[in-house]
Amino acid sequence: MYSTNESTNDENSGQILVETIRRHEKHTFIIIHSHTACNDPNLRWSFASRGVNMITESMIQIRNVLHQLLPLGQINSKSTYTCPYCKWSLFSFSQLYIHVPLYHTNEEELSIKCQICQRSTRNYAVHLHEEHNDEHQQRSIATPLYAFSLVVCQRKRDNRFLVVQESGSKGFWLPGGRVEIGEQLDKAAERETLEEAGVKIRLIGILKIEFVPRSDINRLRIIYFAEPFDEDNCEPKTIPDYESYGAMWLTYEQTLQCNTQGQLRGNEPLKWFKYIVQNGTIHSLSILSKTEV
Ligand SMILES: [Zn+2]
Ligand SMILES: [Zn+2]
């Protein structure tokens, strides 16, 4: 461990010392204990790129890391693994698992064939963590995300709302459905409304973005507000097919009645039609980006 007194000279000699140690001894765990290095990103970057394992101003964290390092020196009968970064060998799995992040987190990602499962991986550390750590797998990092686009579509001439009569007598509901792989959310909204209700729409805004994590999947729902693309040509589809039994335009009052008579699949139509009738906020479509910004 190298402790500095915050002067430029010290930083320079510290870096030279680090380089010297690193050149001769790959297994030494180098800690820089420095307030300056912890608050100056350039200095921190420079130490890290010279192979410093840890840069800290916390004595507690130094004590903790020393505890983590202790088991690495012990050789036991299960010692069969070699670190692909530094070739330090005779590790047990748990030693390798401790060693890799402590020594190599800042190194360039390494593509190798995993010694444990024989599979090739483009990022060894991530692979080790995600594929060979039971605890991590239980947290199920790969929880699927199901995205749905739903549409509240209102036509101006009579303020009626578009509903789909779902198959299997499930009831009236909002047009919309699951977003397909490679599909944009707005395209899914337009496609599903055309498929289920036979109406071509123009999206106007967004009413809500809902994210609901569950034990099996995480669910994302976007509730869009839309109008018919052509008010004079927005006849709903009525031929039953795989998408729906049919579709229709309902007034808010009719929707209320359907609700009392148990004809709604869920409360979404009533909730959102009421929201529109009561002049709820319609957010701009641009709050949802189609690319990483
Ligand atoms: Zn190593
Ligand atoms: Zn593996």
Image (cartoon, rainbow, N blue to C red):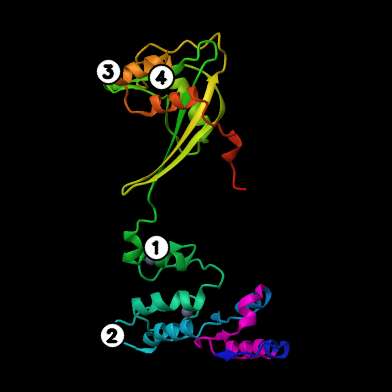
The residue that mark 1 highlights is: 130
Say few, some or many: other residues with alpha carbon within 10 Å of mark 3 (under 14 / 14 to 19 / 20 or more): few
**Disc with the residue nearer the chain's start (4 vs 2):** 2
Q: Specify whether tag 2 is near ligand 1 (CB below 8 Å).
A: no
Magenta stretch: residue 238 in it? no
Element at label 4? strand
Q: Which residues are magenta?
A: 13-41
**Disc with the residue nearer the chain's start (3 vs 1):** 1
Q: Which mark is residue 204?
A: none
The residue that mark 4 highlights is: 163
Circle 4/circle 1 CB separation < 8 Å: no
Q: Which mark is residue 261?
A: 3
Circle 1/circle 2 CB separation < 8 Å: no
The residue that mark 2 highlights is: 77
Query: Between marks 4 and 3, how big is the CA–CA gap?
Result: 16 Å
Query: Between marks 4 and 1, how big is the CA–CA gap?
Result: 44 Å
Q: Amino acid at mark 2?
A: Ser
Q: Nearer the viewer, mark 1 or mark 2?
A: 1
Magenta stretch: residue 23 in it? yes
Q: Is residue 162 above or below residue 35?
A: above
Q: Nearer the viewer, mark 3 or mark 1?
A: 3
Q: Residue at x 39, y 15 (%)?
A: 253
